[in-house]
Structures are given as C-alpha cells and as structure tokens.
Image (spheres, rainbow, N blue to C red):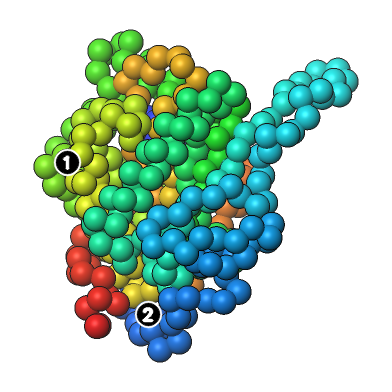
Amino acid sequence: MPRWEQRWHPLREEWVVIAAHRQDRPWHGERLGEASLAQAPPDYVADCFFCPGNARVSGARNPDYRDVFVFDNDHPCVGQDASRELEPPVGVFTNRPATGLARVVCYSPKHNVTLAELDVAEVERVLLTLREQYDELGSRPDVNHVLIFENKGEVVGVSNPHPHCQIYATNFVFKTIETEARASRKYFDETGRALFQDILRSEHEDGRRIIFENSSAVAFLPYFARYAYECYVAPKATHAGLAGLSASELRDLAEALRALLVRYDNLWRMPFPYVMALHQAPTDRADYPGFHFHIECHPPLRKPNLLKYLAGPEIGGGNFLSDTLPEEKASELKNVPDVHYKAAHA
Ligand SMILES: [Zn+2]
Ligand SMILES: [Zn+2]
C-alpha cells in the first residue's frame, strides 16, 4: 500500500511529503565495497593537492602534517577582497556585498581514509579543530556566520577523495540557519523550552529512529527527514555551538558521529556519499535563545545506484517529497554492524 502523509519539519518550518511505497525492499545486492577494496587508492598520492608535502593549486606547499591540517581555500567561493561598492540594481531588485573567508580542513594526512574510518580520538581532534576555527573566524567583526560542511563522494561533486571539509566564514547568515534560529527563538518565547530538546524528547518517546546514543550525545533519523538516510547528530544538552561542549560531551559527540558514519558505510559496504553540515548559531553577537547545535547529514542516495533527484515537487513546488518511510530507513541503519567493513576485513 502506498503511503501518503505530510510531516512538519519544525526547524525548517516546512512540510515534508512522505510518499513511500511499501514494496521497496531493503538492499541485499552485491557487496560493492569488496570490489573497490582491491583497487583502493594508496594512502599518499603524488598529485593530490591535499596530501602532506605536496604543492597546491596556488603553488603553496603543504607542510608534512601528521594530524588535522587547515589552510585557506585556493579557490574560495567567497572572498575577502570582494567589492563593497556594488552597482545599485534597477527597480524592485536589491543587492548587498557578500564577503568572507574560505578554508579547507584535512581530517588526516592519509589520502585513502574517510571520517568513518578514523578512531574516536581522531574524530574528536577534528571536532576540536573545527571548534578553534569557529571561535577564531566567528570572533572577527566582519564574520556573521561560520558554515562548516563536508561534501563526500563523486555524486555530490567531490573530485578529490582526500578526507576534508570546508569552512565558509561570511558576512551573511545562510538561510537554513536563519530559519532554524527564527523557529527556535519563536518556540523558546512561546514555551520557555528549546525546540530541539522537544524534538529529542519526542524521538526518545517514539524510539524507532534513534540510531545510536551514549550518555551525552545522540544520532537519529528524524521523523521529518527529507532524504531517505538523513540523520542528525547532537549533544543532548542545548549549546549554541561546539564551543559550549565540555571535554566529555565533545568525546561523546565524536563517538556518536563516528557510530553513524560507520553504519552509513556498512549499509552498502561502500564509502557512503553525503553532505554534512554543522548547524551552529550565527556569530553576529546577537542572542540565540533555544538554538541547539547539531550536525546534519544529507545523503543523496536512496539505493547504491539511485540518486534522489530534486525535481517537480522540490524544485517546482518547494516541498520535499520523500519516497521512503523514515522508520524503515532508521531500522536499516540500526541493523548493520557497528564495526567498519574495512576494519572487519583487516
Ligand atoms: Zn591526498
Ligand atoms: Zn539544522
């Protein structure tokens, strides 16, 4: 029986349309990962711009780094020297200058690993580095928001597999963050509670979509997921950003994030593509009551070779249409092994 349902996405303030066809079975196909294990790339690649000791596009040479490595993006999409003297548009149109800094964070000197293959201490060091970056960039008067994200996999347009994420520190706040901040503030004003706390409470009450949890962090596939395997990872306590987490909360968060990413890779025994974003409060020195820092993962695949295309409903109509039921996808993720398939092989 096809199932039609609308679910409210309280953080985005929009409806998600669920149109799930129950005959869709979980994947039991060939083990893609094993074929690719044989032809796995080496841990150092001479012409990789991100490997230690190599020259980058700009001509700058990477140090012989052993840990996490941060550098200014050689192809920034936002630039510090962007013009502030804009030509005023005609009529009803409006513009404003877009400025900012862009950086790249390499998770590891090893070319052939993914975040999921790092151990908890290494993931924790990545998060510590991201926290330093957020603090440093966010404290600049010309930076109102720091967006940290990872694009993983060729299907989301990544040409260099060297494990890395990107930082855009901008004079503007990205729309999703603005919407989440507005929704959280409204909810806080009305109820005195953090919206995300009530989402976590409801997820716990239902229980079916919790993928992993430890004492202070949780990973879950939300009730209102737009993508089949969309998941959130968050501290249980409300903090506006990474900066508020204690040492043990940061470690728990690293463990929860890693637990989710391992399950992603194990699902089809292949490096699982996704867009991951850290949603932290803006750094424009305004107050953000009720804003609860979280990490969102948006995997574009519904099946190993089946991309979720944004089409009529999403692009034409502006609402997501999900062809899968969040409860079923969460149960798939819960039921895969929690040891990475490559490590299990070794
Ligand atoms: Zn590399
Ligand atoms: Zn978010």
Residue 144 visible = no
- From the image, state whether disc 2 or disc 1 is nearer to you: 1
Please state the horizontal and vertical placement of residue 141, each as a whole percent of the image.
55, 21
Which residue occupies the foreground of this view, 153 or 102?
Answer: 102
Q: Amino acid at mark 1?
A: Ser
Q: CA distance from mark 2 to mark 1?
A: 33 Å
Q: Are marks 2 and 1 in contact (CB under 8 Å)?
A: no
Name the residue that disc number 1 marks: 248
**Residue at disc 2, secondary structure:** helix
Q: Residue at x 23, y 57 (%)?
A: 120
Vertical order, 270 against 157 (above or below): below
In this view, the residue in front, 5 or 125, is 125
The x and y percentages for residue 91 are 86, 17
User: Which amino acid, mark 2?
Assistant: Gly
Residue beneath the point at 50% across and 38% down = 147
Vertical side of 154 occupied by 71: above or below: above
Query: Splitting the image into 4 quarters, where does residue 61 fall?
Result: bottom right
Q: Earlier in the sequence, mark 2 or mark 1?
A: 2
Q: Is residue 252 in view?
A: yes
Badge 2, how many Cα within 10 Å: few under 14, some, many 20+?
Answer: some
Image quarter where the C terminus lies is bottom left
Q: Which residue is mark 2?
A: 33
Left or right of residue 9: residue 319:
right
